[in-house]
Image: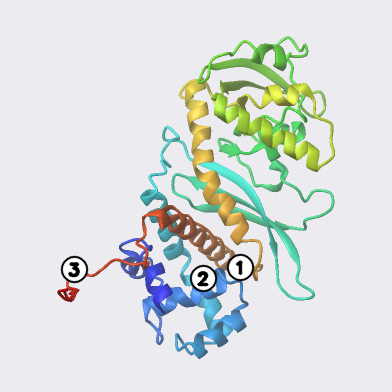
């Protein structure tokens, strides 16, 4: 119980009010205790127990006498509550979500989930989260092996006018062409090993040669280029580049050397050269998105990367709701909430007192005996 009280101290200040204002408590006839409600949900979401096992544990702990079906209903009702808790923790961490110049941006990513048990299934979740509101606007489950199961723009519902940010895993010619054909705007880290690049005249673009002209850390440069797509189609855009600091370059190059060694691949000189830069491909309009603004907007993705990496780690095991949009989104927000709490705990670990909690103002201390 002591650990639970400590964990509650990291919740957003008005987390109980959020439960009422979001409608999570509305209509409940029994077991209305808000604290027991969230604790029961976290047993299911954070610990990965099934709904049935969570209900049994909740009864044994005296949290609620509830069936697995009723618990699923409460998970659905908690969707808005869990979403607001996530948004509040993002705001506490001073992560600037309003970096989109008024545009609604979608952040694409994917995570694997292994359900426990001898016959537990392995799923890949493809999901889209809107910025700055953190709303999940799309999800899809796929297998983790086989054709058409990996990260790809083909996995998503994309519409005209979407502004999309995605990582290097989405940097394929066919995927970029597919998204651009939907009249969407993309911002994706360039996969230098997978993409061919042409200049506006249709001739090969020498990326290595052009990058070497950026010699100072923090310097920014861009080039208008074409990416060959499907059926002789080309996607017009630009690559925006910023040179890393010397310290960041050393870290990136060391990572590449270790990875190629681990995978027993040959280390090509240009791989170490590319590691000196952050290289973004985008077809975002130049009006409203200068080169600096593109890189600054992509930085928002990196600000969130730590949180989403934690989310993907936490989401790796557990029972995944598969048949209802509300329950799945509540599950996703719950996992993200746990990831945010975990990061907050880690960030505060160095400032927590040796005994792990604050001394109450009204506490009294007996004086030391005189010697």
* Residue 359 to residue 182: above or below: below
Q: Residue 256 at what x, y percent from top left?
A: 71, 34
Q: Is residue 159 left or right of residue 13?
A: right
Please tell me which residue is depicted at 42% across the width and 65% down the height of the picture: 81
Q: Is residue 25 above or below residue 127?
A: below
359 is higher (above) or lower (below) than 256? below
Question: Whole-Å distance between the Cαs marked 1 and 2?
Answer: 9 Å
Front-most of residues 68 and 267: 267
Viewer-side label of 2, 3:
3
Residue 361: numbered disc:
3
* Residue drawn at (65%, 47%) of the image: 157
Q: Of discs 1 and 3, which sits in the foreground?
A: 3
Viewer-nearest residue: 360 or 149 = 360
The answer to whether mark 1 and mark 2 are in CB contact below 8 A is yes
Q: Disc 2 to disc 3, how far (Cα)?
A: 40 Å
Image coords of residue 289 (percent x, y):
49, 24
Q: Secondary structure at mark 2?
A: helix
Task: Check disc 2 and report the residue beneath it.
Answer: 76
Q: Residues within 10 Å of mark 1 (few under 14, many from 20)?
A: few
Name the quadrant containing residue 314: bottom right
Cα gap from disc 1 to disc 3, whole angstroms = 48 Å
Q: Quadrant of the C terminus?
A: bottom left
Q: Earlier in the sequence, mark 2 or mark 3?
A: 2
The x and y percentages for residue 37 are 43, 77
**Which residue is labeled 1 in the image?**
324
Q: Residues within 10 Å of mark 2 (few under 14, many from 20)?
A: some
Snapshot quadrant of residue 225? top right
């Amino acid at each position: 119980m002591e650990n639970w009280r400590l964990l509650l101290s990291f919740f957003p200040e008005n987390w109980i009010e959020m439960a009422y204002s979001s409608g999570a408590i509305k209509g409940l006839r029994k077991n209305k205790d808000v604290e027991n409600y969230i604790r029961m949900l976290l047993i299911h979401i954070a610990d990965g127990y099934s709904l049935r096992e969570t209900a049994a544990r909740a009864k044994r702990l005296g949290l609620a006498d509830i069936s697995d079906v009723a618990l699923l209903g409460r998970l659905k009702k908690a969707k808005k509550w869990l979403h607001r808790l996530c948004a509040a923790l993002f705001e506490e961490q001073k992560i600037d979500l309003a970096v989109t110049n008024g545009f609604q941006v979608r952040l694409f990513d994917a995570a694997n989930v292994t359900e426990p048990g001898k016959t537990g299934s392995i799923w890949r979740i493809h999901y889209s989260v809107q910025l700055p509101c953190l709303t999940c606007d799309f999800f899809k489950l796929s297998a983790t092996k086989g054709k058409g199961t990996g990260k790809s723009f083909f996995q998503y519902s994309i519409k005209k006018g979407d502004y999309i940010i995605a990582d290097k895993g989405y940097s394929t010619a066919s995927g970029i062409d597919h998204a651009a054909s939907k009249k969407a705007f993309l911002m994706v880290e360039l996969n230098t090993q997978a993409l061919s690049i042409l200049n506006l005249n249709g001739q090969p673009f020498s990326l290595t040669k052009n990058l070497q002209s950026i010699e100072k850390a923090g310097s920014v440069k861009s080039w208008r280029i074409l990416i060959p797509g499907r059926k002789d189609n080309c996607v017009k855009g630009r690559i925006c580049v910023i040179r890393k600091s010397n310290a960041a370059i050393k870290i990136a190059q060391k990572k590449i050397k270790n990875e190629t060694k681990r995978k027993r691949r040959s280390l090509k000189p240009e791989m170490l050269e590319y590691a000196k830069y952050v290289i973004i491909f985008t077809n975002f309009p130049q009006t409203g998105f200068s080169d600096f603004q593109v890189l600054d907007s992509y930085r928002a993705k990196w600000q969130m990367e730590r949180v989403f990496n934690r989310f993907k780690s936490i989401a790796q095991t557990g029972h995944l709701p598969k048949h209802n949009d509300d329950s799945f989104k509540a599950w996703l927000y719950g996992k993200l909430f746990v990831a945010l709490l975990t990061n907050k705990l880690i960030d505060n670990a160095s400032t927590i007192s040796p005994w792990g909690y604050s001394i109450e103002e009204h506490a009294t201390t007996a004086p030391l005996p005189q010697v």
